Image (cartoon, coloured by chain):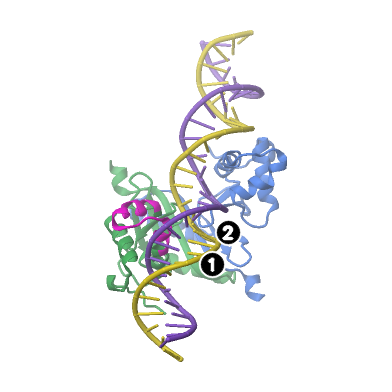
Chain colours: A green, B blue, C yellow, D purple
DNA sequence: CGAGATTGCGTTACTTTATAACGTGTGCAA
DNA sequence: TTGCACACGTTATAAAGTAACGCAATCTCG
């Protein structure tokens, strides 16, 4: 595997609509918020959103924020290595900054290795106040 | 503040009951599972559990696992520095190993600092298969 | 002491988040 | 052309979490 690059063309109609909603937003959206935004496009039920989200997450185009029960479009510079991503979630403006860091990723891998833990997925979420909200 | 050390004596009845349920369990419990276990002790409503959990988390005696919507008693060797804790969550046996790591904690702090992000809380959760489940 | 604040508790009702189960349509491959 | 895989639509339901109300016990400080 590792066909992480999906053009919009690869997406089904529902997936594209959900992806669009997330891309348009500058902060994470809950599945139900997405649903509301897509009523006019024919969305009626949560499952339509969740099914699209499942795929988009699988493709690596969307991340789930566990501590928020919400979703963001991947804005990671290079959208190909999604193993370990760090999210900084501002509790004031609720915007999210996404970044990847090799040092952190390596340390996580090391710790897992040391414990003989077969690592499948890593969640790192930082809560706090972002730069611009501190200024204000 | 920083009275992180709470003896059972410091806890109210409900807090002690919830703490007991979590301590008895060798894997994370959802609030509703705790509720069910405490029916015989007079628990009737989710709020009774959530209120106790809020306090226990505040005291640092319990951790919330964001990716599981569940809670574990803190088994961290020294229960006094809860800033950055790493959880390894086994997807087979659902047991959780908790550990703290200075290298990781420092890196997180560094990244936050670099982004001028005022860090309040850090979540690190690793999903995978634990040592004993791989053996089996 | 005692008026006011604080904290925990119990209950009902409710919101938000997520899934189960079942059936339809479409495209592709044996 | 049959059968499989996959996306889709719908209804119903489960799981997780909160709002709002009122009561009782405990501080606390004038």
Residue for point 36% across, 58% down: A72
Q: Position of residue B49 (x, y in %)?
A: 60, 42
Q: Are marks 2 and 1 on the same chain?
A: no
Residue for point 31% across, 55% down: A38
Q: Which contiguous range is marked in magenta?
A: A32-51
Magenta stretch, main secondary structure class: helix
Residue on which disc 1 sits: A111
- Does residue A6 appear left or right of residue B128 in this picture? left
Judge whether residue A104 is colored magenta.
no
Q: Chain of mark 2?
A: B
- Does residue B20 appear left or right of residue B63 in this picture? right
Q: Position of residue A64 (x, y in %)?
A: 42, 59
In which quadrant will I find the C terminus of chain B? bottom right
* Residue B50 makes an appearance in the image: yes
Nearer the observer, A62 or B79? A62
**Element type at marker 2?**
strand
Nearer the observer, A71 or B111? A71
Q: Chain of mark 1?
A: A
Residue on which disc 2 sits: B99
Gap in angstroms between the C-alphas marked 2 and 1 = 9 Å
- Do the CB atoms of the residues marked 2 and 1 lie less than 8 Å apart? yes
């Amino acid at each position: 595997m590792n066909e992480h690059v999906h053009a919009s063309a690869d997406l089904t109609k529902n997936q594209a609509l959900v992806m669009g909603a997330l891309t348009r937003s500058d902060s994470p959206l809950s599945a139900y918020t997405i649903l509301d935004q897509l009523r006019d496009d024919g969305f009626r039920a949560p499952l339509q959103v969740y099914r699209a989200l499942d795929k988009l997450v699988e493709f690596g185009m969307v991340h789930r924020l566990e501590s928020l029960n919400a979703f963001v479009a991947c804005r990671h510079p290079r959208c190909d290595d999604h193993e370990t991503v760090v999210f900084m979630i501002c509790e004031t403006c609720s915007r999210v900054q996404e970044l990847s860091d090799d040092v952190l990723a390596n340390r996580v891998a090391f710790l897992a290795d040391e414990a003989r833990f077969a690592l499948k997925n890593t969640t790192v979420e930082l809560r706090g106040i972002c730069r611009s909200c501190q200024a204000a």
